[in-house]
Image (spheres, grey):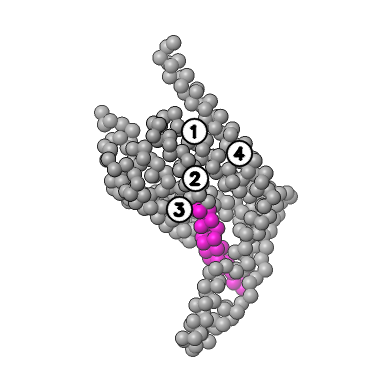
Amino acid sequence: MSKENEKVQPFLEHLGELRKRLIIIIVAVIVGMGFAWNISDEVLQFVTRPISGKTYLTEIKKQIYVEVGKRWPAAYQQFELGKEAEAAPKERKLNYSAPLEPFFVQCKISIIAGFILALPVVFYQLWLFIAPGLTRREKRLVFPFVTVSSISFCIGALFFLIIIWPVIINFSLSYEAEGLNSLFNMSAYINFCLRLILLFGLIFDLPVLLLLLSRFGVVTYSFLARNRRYALLASSIVAAFHADLITMFVIMIPLYGMYEIGVWLVFLFGKKKDVPLEATVGGDGE
């Protein structure tokens, strides 16, 4: 067998292995989608709750106004804060303008929810794909990796939905004025929300990835600490793909924050023995 055939055969084997793992992941997501279809209406109601204007932000605002009324009643009366504090939530609904649009939105919600339900299978298959290149000791990290990665992704998704999403929608609704009303399109609203759910899930998995790379000897604490400014730049670039300033900040800050958490996790639990910088880029410097 020629050297060229020897190189091609391992490549084809890797390609076949990748196809096998992808097929298993797709089947798992489809099964998860089947379960998620039954709760897609509840998920839709949850993500559309902020458009009523009744969120934790409005409750905090009301408490602040009450305190202002107690401490500075003159300012309370002058700026008519009582009207805002007692304002009832507006009845707003999503709108659709194309045939079958609600059905396709339900499909999208079910796919993303099914993907989240299938996360343990997804991460396990990813691990099996890279496992042949790992040592026996490194292979023992499979269950901690699958468990922590799945939990971290879910925490990131919930953090976005509970904390960040109301901020974004509340900021958007703040532009309402006389002659300017919000009219959210169903597909645009849900697509934006689902994209950010996936993004925040991946952001919260960043510390796990950095710790794993450290355990494999790919990166070290000193390498990560030296490159903080590049991490901040990369966070800004990722955030810049989103149009409004508020969304950019609520993406950039958690993303860089997760990098910092990853750096300290590597410091505490990563490999203590420093590897040469050349090893982190996959070369020997020659």
Whether residue 256 is visible, yes or no, is no
Going from the N terminus, do you reach mark 4 or mark 1 first? 4
**Residue placed furthest toward the top:** 1
Going from the N terminus, do you reach mark 1 or mark 2 first? 1
Q: Are marks 3 and 1 in contact (CB under 8 Å)?
A: no
Q: Based on the picture, tell me whether residue 217 belongs to the magenta stretch.
A: no
The residue that label 3 is drawn on is: 239
Q: Position of residue 18 (x, y in %)?
A: 52, 30
Q: Based on the picture, tell me whether residue 165 belongs to the magenta stretch.
A: yes
Position of the N terminus, as image quadrant, is top left
| Kind of residue at badge 2 | Thr
Q: Position of residue 169 (x, y in %)?
A: 56, 63
Judged by depth in the image, the label closer to the viewer, 3 or 2, is 2
The CA distance from mark 1 to mark 2 is 15 Å
| Kind of residue at badge 1 | Leu
Q: Residues within 10 Å of mark 4 (few under 14, many from 20)?
A: many
| Kind of residue at badge 4 | Ala
Q: Are marks 2 and 4 in contact (CB under 8 Å)?
A: no
Going from the N terminus, do you reach mark 3 or mark 2 first? 2
The CA distance from mark 3 to mark 1 is 32 Å
Q: Position of residue 283 (x, y in %)?
A: 31, 31
The CA distance from mark 2 to mark 4 is 17 Å
| Kind of residue at badge 3 | Ala
Query: Secondary structure under badge 1?
Result: helix
The residue that label 4 is drawn on is: 28
> In the rendered image of this protein, does residue 136 appear above or below residue 222?
above
Residue placed most toward the observer, 103 or 183:
103
Query: Secondary structure under badge 2?
Result: helix
